[in-house]
Amino acid sequence: MKILFVHHSTFSANSMNHIGPFAAELKRQGHEVAIALPELDPSFRFFPYPQVPAFSYEDILENPNRFEGEPHQIVHAWTPREIVRQFCEKLWQKVDARLIIHLEDDESAILERTQMRPGEEAHRTDPLQGPMFLEVADAITVIVENLSKFAPEGKPAHHLFPGFEAGPALKNTEPILNKSTFGIPDEFKVITYPGAASGANAEDLIDLFKAIHLLNEHGTPCLLIKTGFPDPGIRNALPKGADSWIRDIGFLPRENMWRLIELADIVVQPGRINDYNQSRLPSKLPDFLCLGKPVVTSAANLGQQLIDGEQALLLNSSTAEEIAGRCQELFSNRE
């Protein structure tokens, strides 16, 4: 089978943590696979699957016969966002292929929770064009079962769990990170959050940041190390002094991110139970679970399939107080 994955963003975007392993496994099984991206940005050097060819949208449109001189048979479009839809419409004029669309989020919930900046329209799902795009698909895949409700009636929908390829993580050649790497005193507990701030998760991150502050206020020295950069709007919503317990370390390649998770005493994925969190699967959760770290996570999305107290400690409200309490449970019970 000749399969073209269509990605909506850069190599460093979280969705590539899912597309990459799927494409590599399909190739290992003997299928011909390629990935199309808006452009081949500099973060391509961090893509850990060199066996999977990647092309820009422009390259594919100029020459869609990328598979031993033939075109693809299946397009797996990663989300119905405008940038993907517009590319697929241009591609239809050149190649007749089956179309599968993958849903990662409740796009309407994202529109409601975030203010769109100028120029971001292409990276959102249009309220009119998005549903029409789904109607012309041959099938739908969803990252969580809750998203199946957006599949048009009668359209096949498959629950596609994100995979985790343990081999590269176990053979990681990146240097091990420890507290001394970041100048952290031994008595401090460490929580890591490999993720950046966005308008959609702002409320959840504020809860996490406040929880770290509460732990310190109540006598548990604790630091949060997070990737990405500070968001002034979020930081301004924190109590005085809360910002001092947060370390922002910018972008990390995937192998370094695994090292950051390994450094943690525990890992936390906050998330109030709402339309946005019920219809997504935070990309870091499979990493947290497969790397064997103690996990505190929301009872939404993947949390609905985890056993509280055995596979994770679940958050029912995900307030700062509940997050701090569940973290303290783990800090107080090393076993």
Image (tube, rainbow, N blue to C red):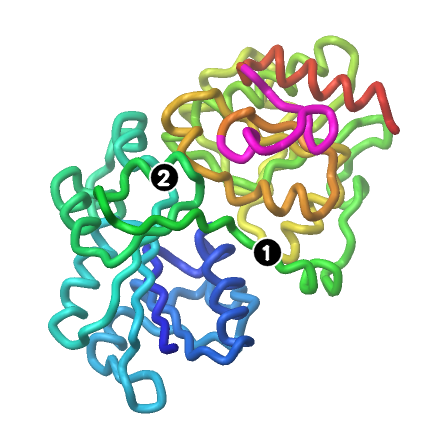
* The C terminus: image quadrant: top right
* Rendered image quadrant of residue 117: top left
- Element assignment for label 2: loop
What's the residue type where badge 1 is placed? Arg
Neighbours of disc 1 within 10 Å: few (<14), some (14-19), many (20+):
some
Can the viewer see residue 235?
no
Q: Residue at x 17, y 55 (%)?
A: 136
Camera-side residue of 316 and 113:
316
* Rendered image quadrant of residue 315: top right
Can the viewer see residue 184?
yes
Q: In the rendered image, which residue does mark 1 sit on?
A: 254
Magenta segment range? 301-316
Position of 92 with respect to 185 (left or right) is: left
Pointer 2 or 1: first along the chain: 2
Position of 242 with respect to 185 (left or right) is: left
Residue 188 coordinates in the image, percent (x, y): 80, 27
Magenta residue check for 104: no
- Element assignment for label 1: helix
Position of 43 with respect to 327 (left or right) is: left
Residue 105, label in figure: 2
Camera-side residue of 31 and 60:
31
Q: Residue at x 43, y 26 (%)?
A: 202
Q: In the image, is residue 122 above or below residue 234?
A: below
* The N terminus: image quadrant: bottom left
Q: In the image, is residue 325 above or below residue 331?
A: above
- Mark 2 or 1: in front is 2
Q: In the image, is residue 144 above or below residue 253?
A: above
Q: Residue at x 46, y 34 (%)?
A: 197
Residue 49 coordinates in the image, percent (x, y): 54, 70
